[in-house]
Image (cartoon, grey):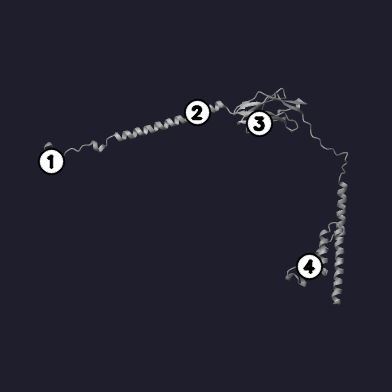
Amino acid sequence: MIQNKIWAVIQWILAAIVLLFAIVAFATSGGIISGLLFVLLAIVVSPLRKKIFSLLPANFQKKSIAIISGVVLAIASLFSFPSAETSQQSESLADEVQERSIPISEDVVETPTEQESNIKSLSFSNSNDIEVLEGKEVSSSYVKANVKDKDSFAESDVIFVSNDPQIATIEYKSTALTNYLYYTVTGVSAGETEIYAISKDGSIESEHKKVTVKVDEEKLAREKAEAEKAEAEKKAAEEAEKKAEEEKLAKERLKPKKNSQKKKLPKKPKLLKQQQQ
């Protein structure tokens, strides 16, 4: 009983010594792995080993397994323990990096500012709403770009936008006097939408104009008339074909059969045939 207590005390002392190595390893640069291995080794050499190994399967509760585990952990801990030379190299490397780094003064750092737009404003030539027939286009208006420097302005600096391209589209057409941009509006399908112009950087936007696309009644009437005409022609052709077929069948019924047209002639007597010869 006394021997068991003495042996337990020795195990706790060994575990404490190993834990000291673990603390030194943790305190040393690059010694985290070594410190963890020392902690595991301290558990293996302490009396706590029995409780932990009891949780394992029966095959791993043997004394030989515990000894092998302790030896392996001891070797791995010692080999992974960071040396003084490694620590010095790490510190010198950190000092070198710090020396080479250039301190940045707050006075030197400047927040980049966004380039100011050359366009001051965009405006349509008139504020009237636009009406266009489906499938047609109108192109009598322009957008004026009020710019700071005409020499650096290009038509690509302005983008024409339609809120619903399925109803109407707007496209750039031509330029006059550098900053007068003419456009065309095309009706796609019946409905209402809005169009506007915006600078390429998105900072300047014109007013919105309402576009109403109406159905082309004349076009619909023409299409309806053409459809009705085609239907009537198709019906007339079908009736003519049907009539021709009926006439053909009627003629075939009235036509006599070939067998009925041929009459059987009486046979000449044999004696008469000889006389004739």
Residue under label 3, please give it: 193
The image quarter in which residue 68 lies? bottom right
User: Quadrant of the image for the C terminus?
Assistant: top left
Label 3, label 1: how many angstroms apart (C-alpha)? 108 Å
Mark 4 nearby-residue class (10 Å; few <14, some 14–19, many ≥20): few
Instruction: Kindly tell me whether residue 237 is visible in this rendering.
Output: yes
Question: Disc 4 or disc 1, which is closer to the eye?
Answer: 4
Q: Identify the amino acid type marked 4.
A: Ile
Q: Identify the amino acid type marked 1.
A: Lys
Label 1, label 2: how many angstroms apart (C-alpha)? 80 Å
Label 2, label 3: how many angstroms apart (C-alpha)? 32 Å
Q: Circle 4 sits in a helix, a strand or a loop, which is it?
A: helix
Residue under label 2, please give it: 226
Expressed as whole percent of the image width and height from the top left, the position of residue 251 reads: 31, 33
Are dots 4 and 2 in contact, CB under 8 Å?
A: no
Q: Residue furthest top?
A: 177
Label 3, label 4: how many angstroms apart (C-alpha)? 76 Å
As drawn, the label of residue 52 is: 4
- Pick the residue in front: 173 or 92: 173
Residue under label 1, please give it: 270
Expressed as whole percent of the image width and height from the top left, the position of residue 102 reads: 87, 44
Mark positioned earlier in the residue sequence (2 or 3): 3
Residue at the spot x=87%, y=53% of the render?
91
Mark positioned earlier in the residue sequence (4 or 2): 4
* Residue 214 horizontal side relative to residue 208, left or right: left
Q: Identify the amino acid type marked 2.
A: Glu
